[in-house]
Amino acid sequence: MSASMPTRIVIIGGGPAGNSCATTAARLGAEVTLIERDVIGGAAHLNDCIPSKAMIATGNARQFLRRSARMGLADVGSEVDLEHLALRLRTIESRLESQVRSLLSSQHVELIHGTATIVDEHTVRSVSEGGTFDHHADVIVLATGSRPRIPDWAPIDGDRILTTRDAYPPKSLPSHAIVIGSGVTGVEFVHLFESMGSEVTLVVSRQQVLPGKDPEVAAALEEDFLRRGIRLFKGARATGVEREGDDVVVSCNDGRVARGSHVLLAIGSIPNSEDLGLDNAGVATDGGYVPVDAHLRSNVPHIYAAGDLSGRLPLSSVASMQGRKIAEHAMGALHPERSRLIDYDKAASAIFTEPEIADVGLAEADAFSEGRKVRVTKVPFASSAKALINDDSRGFVKIVSDPATGVVLGGSIVGRHAAELISVLAIAVTNGLTVSDIHESLMVHPTLAEALSEAAE
């Protein structure tokens, strides 16, 4: 390739990873083609992540109205209007997709709405309404995302037996929803359905909701679920789902049976890697995922993978960062003094239940299991003036630090706006700040953020 020729990058998948990669590479001088078969902005992002949070916001508003009398307000109606809610979700999706399209257009990214197949190491074939074309690629980026996992024993019908993508919103509001899966998505749907007035049963295959999370954090959520009347089938693995008229029946391996009006499956996802033609370019896979190195390269050096397909943390924030890092690496724009490899152990994450849950970095339980000496400080929101003003003092702030240096190693937050507050700890963990750096910062009063300063004291 002539030195004067721009690098040609073909990206398959228009979610957060693909979009971030496309706009960054274009700004760095690449000639970029992005091929997306579904929603520009990403199906998992715009048809799953965003609508779920929008519905949770509606449920949270309903809960707030239900307890408004305690804050000096007369009772306000709070019935859920599914038709209006569906319109709201479509409006949000349309606006976000339009913004993504505008950004790609402003960077002169060629956008093709169609399917893509790898023909050989440097050729990608697109099929769309505009025709079939072969695109030469100096660099290929795979960012095709994932979809809900559906086991053989769950006959999904989109009516009463649902995947997450059938539930934005469901055709009818469940009178009794049975949620299978107690990971992040599962507990968010438990909160969502209960906040909208449904009875809820959660099938928990382990002895703790949110397996892998800090046990104290999980216990706080479980306590709140039980207070709200949610039934927990702990240590039960679902083995079958059947419809009986307007009811659905879930059978578990321990003999227990749950009966409700709707079932929602939240038991993980599988990567969208089939029919991509990966074998044509010799790209290795593992369980459908594309293993990558620290620079997100597959075993074929000029073919990268990002987002859910890479098998790393399935977070939109991580996918966006991966896309940017790929563009910088492919374009030779990495600056050692300013650029860092992605440290997945320092990625902040949040769970949009109520109370919200967020964490970053080293967890207390992991530190102790590794025999690592840490200092753990915890402050309950019950001592926060703003929490009392908000009439919601649930939860706490916990900071994990190095006892010798005071460097912040991690933290967890349970409570209102935890997803926003965790950003303070995320910056501290990423940049090696100390508890003194947080404590010496002048926080606004009264705010929930003051609890961070108190925990760092």
Image (cartoon, rainbow, N blue to C red):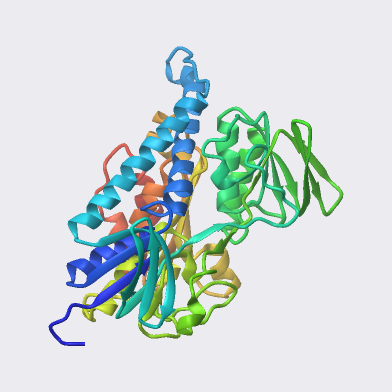
Looking at the image, which residue sits at the far front?
A: 131
Question: Who's the residue at 48% across and 81% down the image?
Answer: 280
Query: From the viewer's perspective, is 7 left or right of 210?
Result: left
Q: At which x and y percent is residue 130?
A: 33, 58
User: On the image, which quarter does residue 18 sit in?
Assistant: bottom left
Question: Who's the residue at 57% across and 77% down the image?
Answer: 286
The quarter of the image holding the C terminus is: bottom left
Looking at the image, which residue sits at the far right?
A: 255
Question: Who's the residue at 48% across and 13% down the image?
Answer: 75
The quarter of the image holding the N terminus is: bottom left
Would residue 457 be seen by someone viewing this image from the given angle? Answer: no
Q: At which x and y percent is residue 203?
A: 71, 47
Which residue is at the front of the view, 377 or 188? 188
Q: Is residue 366 above or below residue 38?
A: below
Q: At which x and y percent is residue 294?
A: 40, 80
Which residue is at the front of the view, 140 or 261? 140
Q: Is residue 252 above or below residue 213?
A: above
Looking at the image, which residue sits at the far left?
A: 4
Q: At which x and y percent is residue 113?
A: 36, 56
